[in-house]
Structures are given as structure tokens and as C-alpha cells.
Amino acid sequence: MRLSTAARLQLWVCAAFALVLAVTLLVLLRQAEKDVVRELESGRALALHLFDGLSRSADLSTLEPFENIRHVRISRPDQPLVLTSSDEFPDWLLHWMRPAIERGFPPVYVTFPDSQQWMISPDPHDELEEAWESVIQLLVVFAIAFVLSLLVIQLGLRRGLRAYNELLSGLQQIRTGDLDARLMPSQQPELNHLAERFNGMAAALQRAEASNRQLTHALMNLQERERTELAHTLHDDLGQYLTGIRAQAFMLREAADRPEHVRDHAGRLLQACDGLQQGFRRLVRELHPVVLERLGLEQALRQLTEQWQHQQVIDCHLELDEDLPELQPQARTHLYRLLQEALNNVARHAQADQVWVRLQRRGDSLVVSVQDNGCGLSAEPESGLGLRSMQERARCLNSLLRIITRPGEGLLLNLNIPLKGVL
């Protein structure tokens, strides 16, 4: 089971607090050891000073002079002080301090001239109580800081998770097709920035969906228009030729015994067959550039520009490198159709009298451009069906169609095709 981000963050905070508390507690205990040792040394020095003064003045028969001395205990040698625990501090603290106390302060024996003997023993109980109070204060401060940290983290996480849940809800709406989903602005700059990005993405998806609907509608209309044109061509053009051929064949049969009529009908029959053949060729050429498969890209482009120049009465200059690469069939078709559409756009919109089509190989790329000397554009070109089809064909060639234009200075279409994916 994987922990959530909030749970992992809280675990990291707990671990950090535990580590800092352990280090701080260790430092505090080490300092308490030094303080206990320092106080015991001070108490023992004071007791020895008093013993020295009393040994010159009189016999020591009472412990009254030593009652105010802290951290040491004066007793007879047969009454040694045993360090025991107290209700004021826990046993572990005494066990922690005992080695340092016993190592640094063994009992000291003092003998008077009258043969009286006293023993000075360390009594660290007061210092241990003060050290334990410091430990309690440290634990209280850490507990308060720990609780406040968790509360602040929980508050921050709650706000962050609320924004996260709103983002998930918005993404789910986007996934179900509801592109009207938007995130509300936030007072936090980071969350507000995220909301702006999400809303921008949703708006872009809406525009893309609207554009796709428009493109789909245009493609459907184009498909119906092409089918209509194909039907008209088959019925009005090729159908008439077939009807004429059938009529001439019937007349040939009826005029079989009249040679001059046979020759006349045979000539008309040949004319009808030629028209039928030309119509079929034109229809096939419009449906698919068969010339690409038979002649290759270079010859197909030469034929395309020559026919277009003859039909539109616009000078078309074709510039091809000698070492053009051999593209895959699908790539050749996309490039051919792209150039065909570009030339058609020049004829419809550019008002130009010259156009240049260039294909140049530069390293691992094929640079293709179509430039005219027409009227140019004063703004971004509208994304019509022709432009969209050229853009999609450029994407199929792993390239990006660039349009450079200025009013009165013509228009330049350019794309840089990487050869790695089209050879």
C-alpha cells in the first residue's frame, strides 16, 4: 500500500523532529554532565577549605558548618553515601550520570589531629533535579513546535489538496468531453498560475475542437462536391462519349455495305474513343498522381508546373537540386499534393505573374519553398481547408509549414523536411 503525499510529508516531519530532538537531548545531557562535575568540584573544594580551617581551631564534633554546602555529603567512613534514584528525576538520568560522577569524584577522607576521620562524598541530587527540569522544558518546547508544525502543514496541505482535487475534477470533465471546465482564480500565486494554465489549455482544446468540427464539415462538403463532380464527369462527359460510341457502332452495322459511310462513322468513332481516353486520363490524374509512380518526383513536378503554367498563364520557375533524395511513395505523394495546393492558392489569391518552386537538399534535410510576387497578406492567413490540408501534409512529412508574407511583397511558403523519416 502506497502512502499519500500528506502521509509521507508528515512522516518526514516526524523523523526530522525526532532526529533534532535526539541530538538536542544528547547535547543537553552532555552539558548537564559538565555542570554536575563543575558543581561537585566547587562543593568539594569548599568542604576541604572548611575542614582545613576547623583543623586549626578545634575538634570537629558537629556537622553544622557543612549544612549549607550543596552537592557534597560529610559523613563518617562507616556511613558511605549510596547514590539512589529520587521522585524528582527518573532512574535513567542517574544511570547516565553515575559513571562520570564515580570516575571523577571518589570519596575523599579527612583526618584530624585528634584522629577523627571524615569522608567527603558527592551528592548530585540537586543537579540531577535541575537537569531533569531542563529536559522537561526541552520536551515541552519540542512538543509545542511539533504540534504547531503539523497544524501548519495540515493547513497548507488542505489548501493544496483542495486545488489538486479541483484540478482532477476539471481534468475529468475534459476527459468526458466537457471543454467548458474552468478553475477558479486563487489567492495563492502558484495555484493561480496553475489555474491560468489549465484554463488556457481548456480554451485551446475548445478552439481545436471547433476547428476540427469546421474542418470535418468542410471535408464532408468537399467529399460530396468531389463525388458530385465525379458523377457529372462520368455522366456528362464520359457517358456522352460512350453513348456516341454506341451510336456510331450501330450506324457502322447499318452502313456495312456502303464503304464511304463506314469510313465516316469509323472516323467519328475514333474521335469519340480519343475523347473518352483523355477524359479517363484527366479523371485518373485528379484522383491520384499516377505520374509519380511512373516518372518519379522530379519529372512529376516538372509536368505539374508546366501544365499549371499553361492553364493559369503565370510564369512558374522550378528549381531542383541535382542530388534530390529518393523519397518513400507516401512522402512523395504528400509533397506533390502540398505543392499542387500551394500553386492553386497562388492562382486563386496571389494576383501574381511569377512563382518560384524550389527543392534543395541541405545536409540531412530537404528544403522546399514556394514563393510568388503577388499582393501578399496584411494579417495572419485564415485557416481554410487548403491551408489546413497543407499543414497536415507538412506534419505527415515531420515538418512545419511556415508562411512569410508582407503586403505587396508576395508570399513565401517554406518547410524543412528531415530526410531520416521519409527516405
Image (cartoon, rainbow, N blue to C red):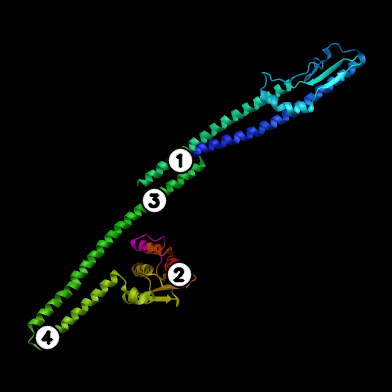
Q: Determine which residue is flagged by label 2.
A: 367
Q: Is residue 13 above or below residue 89?
A: below
For the record, the magenta segment spans: 376-389
Measure how far apart labels 3 and 4 are at the Cα level: 70 Å
Q: Residues within 10 Å of mark 1 (few under 14, many from 20)?
A: some
Q: Nearer the observer, disc 1 or disc 2? A: 1
How far, Cα to Cα, is label 2 from label 4?
Answer: 59 Å
Disc 1 target residue = 164
Mark 3 or 1, nearer chain start: 1
Q: Which residue is mark 4?
A: 262
Residue bearing mark 3: 205
For badge 3, the amino acid type reads Leu
- Where residue 282 sits, quadrant-wise, is bottom left
Residue 179 visible in the current orientation: no
Q: Earlier in the sequence, mark 2 or mark 3?
A: 3
- The answer to whether residue 79 is left or right of residue 245 is right
Please tell me whether mark 3 or mark 1 is closer to you in this view. Answer: 1
Q: Is residue 100 visible?
A: yes
Q: Amino acid at mark 2?
A: Val
